[in-house]
Amino acid sequence: MERCGLADQKNRTGGLPTAPEQENKKRKIPWGMLYILVTVIALVLFGVFNREFGNVFRTLSNLAPGFLLLAVVITVFYFVFEGGIIRLLMRSQNFPMRWGSALKISLIGIYYSYITPSATGGQPMQSAYLRRDKIPVGISAAVLIIKFFCFQCAFVLCSLLSFIFMYDKLTLENPAIIPFIILGLIVNGGSIIFFPSLFIKPVLHNICRFAKWLVKKMRFLGRFHLMDSIDRFEADFGSYRENFREKRGSVLWGILLSIPQFILQMSVIYFVFRAFGYHDIGYWEVFAVQSLLQVSVSFMPMPGASGAQEIGFSAFFRNYFAKDDLYSAVMVWRFFTYYLVVIAGALLVVVDQFLYGRRKKAEQESTTEE
């Protein structure tokens, strides 16, 4: 009877929304458009408050374009590896993923890592985007933690080998940076131990219990039904843990593929080095110094390790850019490894949010017509 009444009401109004429905539509907040607006504003402010970002284009015009193009190509291949490893780990859990989606998730993750303190925003935002594709948060969180673990293994391994390779030269020419390198190796090495511990059942259970305790203490969170969400998260995360032993091969492949991915990321500086006209230092030495810089500042709490990266670059590469061009080198290097990624990520977020909004609107209209 109730359904008939609704149908009659719809017929009497000619299929048009009634006054209460119109009022509800008016009250609906356009979160998608607000999200796009905030992203655009952040991008504009990003350019306004980074003076070196404006100066970098003048410096680029005086450099060898071929090597700069190679720096861009290397960065693109780095994204391909990032997306490929995520796709591999998702498929190992019977969640097929297209290459386009994998590349989008990889760039979005790197973008949010670069604009949030200590790179804390990358994995949560990737999980949020994967949820659109009907992938449970627990599964996506587990996969992304394993992805991070794989990269950290490659990161620490390559950095440790670089430290051994460069130790004698650092001792003679730049001993002050050695304690920072050791601290970075310890911190990043510790993450290799910490994140796999989340797959130990009692550890995960106690973390979820603590989350529930916080929700109970903060009563205003009750309306979000977080208690049920935490239980579902623990169950989904646990299902990944149960399959982990059977699919260790995918994790091993993730680690092996992360090694060339890390090498690609650390290789950008070599092509910047060559673009400035330097050719007297070999590739592996420049790569080693860059990896040691990265391990020394990666745990800094600033977004993208801003400030620490620039200061660290000046300390690590002061003997390599010897033509009074160290500051210019810092600007160009940060442009290719940070600013360019932030710009590309922001544009992707805006376009993707716009297309997602149109798709959701079309689905709602289709449901209404039925």
Image: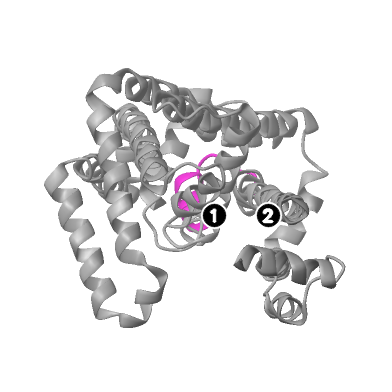
Which residue is located at x 35 percent, y 75 percent? 222
Which residue is located at x 83 percent, y 72 percent? 12
Note whether residue 125 is visible. yes
Quadrant including the N terminus: bottom right
Residue 74: x and y in percent read 63, 29
Could you say which is closer to the camera, residue 42 or residue 32?
A: 32
Identify the residue under disc 1: 112
Q: By what rule are the colours in the image chosen? A: one colour
Q: Quadrant of residue 254?
A: top left
The furthest residue to the left: 202
Which residue is located at x 50 percent, y 44 percent? 317
Q: Quadrant of residue 346?
A: bottom right
Q: Is residue 346 above or below residue 73?
A: below
Q: How many marks?
A: 2
Note whether residue 51 is visible. no
Residue 355: x and y in percent read 75, 50
Residue 64: x and y in percent read 77, 33
**Mark 1 vs mark 2: which is more N-terminal?**
1
The furthest residue to the front: 1
Identify the residue under disc 2: 346
Left or right of 276, for residue 265:
left
Residue 200: x and y in percent read 16, 41
Tell me if residue 344 is in the magenta stretch: no
Callout 1 amino acid = Tyr
Which residue is located at x 65 percent, y 32 percent? 100
Left or right of 245, for residue 352:
right
The furthest residue to the right: 14
Label 1 Cα crowd, 10 Å radius (few <14 / some 14-19 / many 20+): many
Task: Give the CA distance from mark 1 to mark 2.
Answer: 9 Å
The magenta region covers 310-324
Q: Which mark is residue 169?
A: none
Q: Secondary structure beneath disc 2?
A: helix
